[in-house]
Amino acid sequence: MQPKYKKCLDKLNKLKEDVSGANDVANAGYYSLLSIAYEKSGNHAKARECFDNLLSTRTALLPDGASYVVPYLLETKQYKEALKKINEEENTWMSHGRDTVDYTYSNTILMNKARVLQALGRYEEAINTGMRAYNLSDSLTRRIKEQNATWLSEKMGKKVLKSYIENQDKQLTINRWANIIMGVLLFICITLIVFVIRDNRIIKNKNRVSSSLIGELSKYKTELFDRMSEHPDKVNNAASANDKASATDDKGKAVNSGETVKTEKKTDSKAHNEEYEQFLKIEKIIFEKNLFIRTKLSRTEVAAEAGMSTSHFNAVFDKYSQLTFTNYINNLRMERAAKLLKEKPNYSIEAIAQECGVPVRQTFYRLFSKKYGMTPADYRDNI
């Protein structure tokens, strides 16, 4: 259709104008429609070219030509420039004393202005302008119907005319209430949009701070675990110091309860330290060998890696771990996920879930949200 229309337009431009400026208006209308069509189809370069051709017409430079320019400005979100054009057109309309009870003024100028004001966040002005448009449209409808009624009065009897007018009044009442309801709904929608935007900003700020804290905590946890793994003797010394402190009275003097009690305490303390060393060994093996990324990791597998029987592993793990085995492993998986989301931004969420031993997407999202209070995608966006 475009080549045929362009061919006709070129032919028209070569003809003599019966009305001055008619060809220019035709060109403006053609490039206006074409620029919008290209912009909607995603061909932004071609759309801009057509818009530049539109601006080269005399019609587009006149205040009355804003109706050709504004649609493209709205489509490309150039709201400030669109508002400027609309104001020029409206001022010209008013300065010439033209009737505002007009379809072009109410349904084109005012409605476009309401859209632009809403996009610019000037919601109160947008509502007022929209209501003006609706009221003028209502007045225009009434005027048209009154004109029709006058015409009908010449053709029909008074009885038929009265019935017709009553029906029209009912329809006008319905339209008036519909306009009021639409205005209320528009106000409610704008209010909800304002609250949603505000809440989204609060949530984004919260997620941004949380993401930062998650990264810091993961870093500190890794450093703490490395130090505990490299210096288990410090932990043992601390446990021995606690045992000695508990064996003194309030005045700082050692309490002599007999050789048997001392031997039992030393034996218990030694057993406690050995078990705690074994627990640190378990944590170190799980962490260093990345056992937790196995999809179906069991206690038996970890016990075998640590060189322990399953029953002994269970006793040591349950004594010193504050979490169940499943929750403990899932925590390590999610900490690794948080680290990968930060270090590997080119990885998809599914790929990271696979690397963390959670191949099911829904499960991965549920575990991550449960631990950090946000989805993996939100965490990545706020890093």
Image (tube, rainbow, N blue to C red):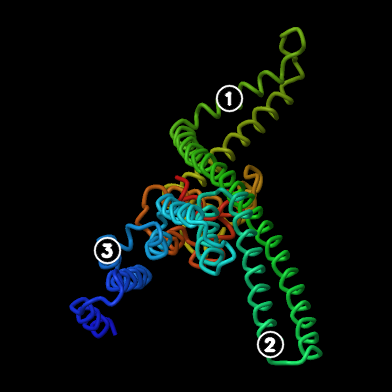
Query: In the displayed structure, does residue 57 sit left or right of residue 232?
Result: left
**Residues at marks 3 and 1, CA–CA distance in whole angstroms:** 87 Å
Q: Which residue is mark 2?
A: 152
Q: Residues within 10 Å of mark 1 (few under 14, many from 20)?
A: few
Q: Secondary structure at mark 1?
A: helix
Which x, y percent locates residue 219?
46, 38
Query: Residue drawn 75% across and 74% down?
Result: 174
Nearer the observer, 64 or 80: 64
On screen, residue 265 versus residue 76, left or right, reads: right
Q: Earlier in the sequence, mark 3 or mark 1?
A: 3
Which is nearer the N-term, disc 1 or disc 2?
A: 2
Residue 319 at least partly seen: yes
The residue nearer to you, when weighing 284 against 10, is 10
- The residue type indicated by label 3 comes to Thr
Q: Position of residue 67 (x, y in %)?
A: 42, 64
Mark 3 and mark 2 lie on one chain; the one further toward the N terminus is 3
Rounded to the nearest angstrom, the CA distance separating label 3 from label 2 is 44 Å
Name the mark on residue 57: 3
Three-letter residue code for mark 1? Ala
Residues tagged 3 and 1 counted as in contact (Cβ below 8 A): no
Q: Position of residue 45 (x, y in %)?
A: 26, 64
**Is residue 126 toward the left or the right of residue 342 in the image?**
right
Write down the residue under mark 1. Answer: 238
